[in-house]
Amino acid sequence: MPSVVGLLEQHELAARRRGDGLREEADRIQAELAAAELEWQEWAIARRRVDTVLAPDDGAAAEAKVTADPQDAEVQSTLRDAAKPKSQVPVWRQGLAWSVLSVDYQRIVTAPADRARLHQGPLTCQEMAAVFGMDVVPARMEALRSKAKRLVARGWLAEQQPGQFTLAAGVSGPGDGS
């Protein structure tokens, strides 16, 4: 029969081994967490740089040439209405066609337009992701939120409550002439 001291030593040794194993695992997790935070910071910096590049160019739009040919004038007008090199989302104004937006932005504007046509309330990014058949994960939702916020800033969408998007006043659906 083992002694009480021997049993205590066995339990102490097992507890020490378990503690050492947990400490090693904690160190591994800390290192993984530090690497993840570094990666997150790098992506945040990249996103800020992209936002800077895509920011409006302070209204410095190039002047269109005056031409005698009406077709050339129409093409130049369309080019002027299209997204500028640094701004993928032009500022909305009366009569501006949805076709000036990229396909992604058109999809985002169409979703609240459909909700408005059905007399439903505002649309969240989570609902948009589900409507588009995307995985409802934070990365996808943040990408949608960023684009929706850009559309709000340019006058295409309205955000009356944080995270809830509707069409801006005056913006009509894609089939309504704008």
Image (tube, rainbow, N blue to C red):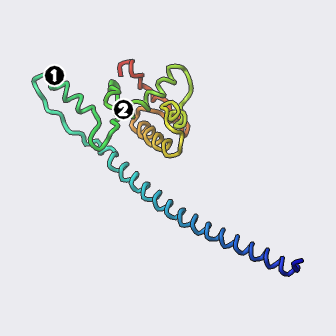
Residue at image position (34%, 32%) is 101
Residue located beneath label 1 in the image:
71
Answer left or right for 71 relative to 50: left
Which image quadrant for residue 1?
bottom right
Q: Residues within 10 Å of mark 2 (few under 14, many from 20)?
A: few
Residue 160 visible, this orientation? no
Please identify the residue farthest to the top as the structure is shown.
176
Answer left or right for 15 relative to 36: right
Dot 1: what SS?
Answer: helix
Residue 163 versus residue 23: which sits nearer the camera? 23
> Which amino acid type is marked by label 2?
Val
Marks 2, 1: nearer the viewer: 2
First reached walking from the N terminus: tag 2 or tag 1: 1
Q: Residues within 10 Å of mark 1 (few under 14, many from 20)?
A: few
Residue 36 pos. (x, y %): 50, 59
Which image quadrant for residue 27?
bottom right
Dot 2: what SS?
Answer: helix
Residue located beneath label 2 in the image:
103
Residue 158 pos. (x, y %): 47, 33
> Which amino acid type is marked by label 1?
Gln
Residue at image position (39%, 54%) is 46
Which image quadrant for residue 3?
bottom right
